[in-house]
Image (spheres, rainbow, N blue to C red):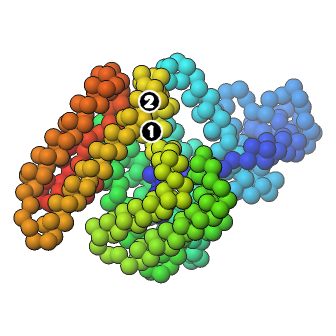
């Protein structure tokens, strides 16, 4: 399963194709015959274009406009996938226009824009279902599932497709529900991430049961061409030489294969998570060796959503490049140090030594408070509040649970 499953599945839109399809619909059907109950001379003449008449009444809603266009394109024999692109293009244009207006009105308030983004994603299924109809929507959305949850393109029976779609849809809706809880302040980002990790593990287990271990592992493999294309896009700003790219491509392919092997072999969730972490660290070290420390660190910043947000809103949040780099470095140092300290304590316990977990927790708490105070003093109270309010600065329990009732505490 793609690590980006929490984020929305977007269909790549072909603007020229959508525009061409709209023109074809206009030319073949003629605008006046568009809406049932609208009587015009053009309709009586057999779809002869009447440039003076609208193709639907001004009172028709945007949803009805999309459905009108889709119905007429479908009657022309346009494939459902193209119809979905046309509908999605219209939706994106309308939402982008509204987002631009809202940005000007609220001066780019991140909370307002985040609420809009959540609103868009929550309503996307309903919008596309209204445009394509139930059958067309299911066909389009099932293809989204295959692209997202079956990257290895394993052949599925009809029953397997239906079952996989139901599992995938449940996970997708659960993700939206968690994001809504985060936005309303009922859970924090770390708590939402923990809950989603459990849901994702459950989904993966159910997919294994559905397909069997071997077919499930195969379903998670990436097509070599897709791997190469994705890697080129990911490394664009690092600008590797061709020799470096080929070496990193081999590393990435090996990493994909090893992840597939782990998915087939691991039954213990805790062991599986630790092995994935070890595998990720080994890949990162190879990237660092090939690219060099400076280029690798720049790539890590590019991949970090918190760093990207700080860069995007640096003026609004009272930051500059130097402060952003310092905040990023301090948070990374805190996280790595806390994880290393906790891992060391677990290793000692595994060797039979007694570990005072209350003391471990207190030391971690003190370290978090010191880091938080240092950042607050460095960027100033106002900027620190904005970083904290937008989830950039969060001092939660490091990865991995503390035993004996200590897991999940917030600092």
For label 1, count other residues whose C-alpha is less than 10 Å away and answer few (under 14), some (14-19) or many (20+): some
Which residue is at 78% across, 55% downward? 78
Which residue is at 25% across, 36% downward? 371
- Mark 2 or mark 1: whose residue is earlier in sequence: 1
Label for residue 292?
Answer: none
Q: Nearer the viewer, residue 46 or 337?
A: 337
The quadrant the C terminus occupies is top left
Q: Which of 185 and 299 is in front in this view?
A: 299
In this picture, is 100 found above or below 408? Answer: above
- Image marks 2 and 1: residues in contact by CB distance under 8 Å: no
Label 2 to label 1, Cα distance in Å? 12 Å
- Element type at mark 2: helix
Find residue 207 and report its horizontal and vertical position in percent. Answer: 43, 71
**Is residue 223 left or right of 179 when viewed as pictured?**
right
Residue at numbered disc 1: 307
Residue at numbered disc 2: 322
Find residue 82 and report its horizontal and vertical position in percent. Answer: 73, 53
Q: Which of 90 and 5 is in front in this view?
A: 5
- Element type at mark 1: helix
In this picture, is 379 found above or below 232? Answer: above
Find residue 134 and report its horizontal and vertical position in percent. Answer: 59, 55
Q: Hey, which quadrant is residue 327 in on the image?
A: top left
Find residue 251 and report its horizontal and vertical position in percent. Answer: 53, 67
For label 2, count other residues whose C-alpha is less than 10 Å away and answer few (under 14), some (14-19) or many (20+): few
Which residue is at 32% across, 66% downward? 274
Q: Hey, which quadrant is residue 369 in on the image?
A: top left
Q: Which of 285 and 129 is in front in this view?
A: 285
Q: Visible in this render: residue 201?
A: no
Q: Visible in this render: residue 51?
A: yes
In this picture, is 45 found above or below 167? Answer: above
Which residue is at 42% across, 77% downward? 264
Q: Which callout, 2 or 1, points to the residue nearer the camera? A: 2
């Amino acid at each position: 399963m793609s690590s980006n499953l929490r984020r929305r599945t977007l269909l790549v839109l072909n603007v020229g194709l959508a525009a061409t399809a709209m023109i074809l619909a206009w030319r073949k059907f003629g605008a006046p015959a568009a809406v049932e109950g609208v009587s015009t001379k053009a309709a009586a003449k057999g779809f002869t274009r009447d440039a003076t008449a609208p193709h639907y009444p001004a009172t028709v809603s945007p949803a009805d406009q999309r459905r009108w266009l889709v119905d007429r394109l479908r009657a022309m024999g346009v494939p459902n996938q193209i119809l979905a692109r046309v509908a999605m293009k219209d939706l994106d244009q309308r939402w982008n226009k509204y987002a631009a207006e809202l940005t000007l009105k609220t001066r780019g308030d991140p909370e307002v824009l985040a609420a809009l983004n959540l609103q868009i994603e929550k309503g996307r299924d309903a919008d596309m279902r209204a445009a394509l109809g139930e059958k067309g929507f299911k066909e389009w959305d099932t293809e989204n599932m295959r692209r997202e949850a079956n990257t290895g393109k394993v052949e599925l029976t009809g029953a397997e497709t239906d079952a996989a779609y139901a599992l995938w849809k449940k996970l997708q809706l659960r993700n939206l529900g968690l994001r809504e809880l985060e936005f309303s302040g009922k859970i924090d980002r770390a708590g939402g991430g923990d809950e989603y990790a459990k849901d994702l593990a459950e989904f993966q287990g159910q997919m294994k049961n559905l397909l069997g271990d071997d077919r499930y592992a195969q379903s998670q493999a990436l097509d070599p061409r897709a791997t190469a294309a994705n890697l080129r896009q990911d490394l664009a700003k690092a600008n590797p030489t061709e020799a470096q790219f080929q070496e990193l491509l081999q590393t990435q392919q090996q990493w994909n294969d090893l992840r597939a092997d782990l998915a087939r072999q691991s039954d213990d969730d805790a062991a599986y998570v630790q092995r994935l972490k070890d595998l990720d660290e080994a890949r990162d070290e190879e990237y660092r060796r090939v690219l060099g420390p400076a280029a690798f660190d720049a790539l890590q910043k590019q991949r970090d959503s918190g760093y990207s947000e700080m860069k995007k809103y640096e003026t609004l949040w009272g930051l500059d490049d130097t402060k952003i780099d310092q905040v990023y470095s301090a948070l990374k140092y805190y996280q790595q140090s806390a994880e290393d300290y906790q891992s060391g304590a677990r290793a000692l316990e595994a060797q039979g030594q007694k570990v005072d977990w209350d003391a471990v927790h207190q030391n971690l708490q003190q370290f978090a408070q010191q880091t938080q105070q240092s950042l607050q003093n460095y960027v100033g109270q106002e900027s620190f509040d904005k970083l904290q309010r937008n989830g950039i600065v969060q001092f939660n329990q490091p990865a991995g649970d503390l035993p004996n009732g200590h897991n999940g505490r917030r600092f």
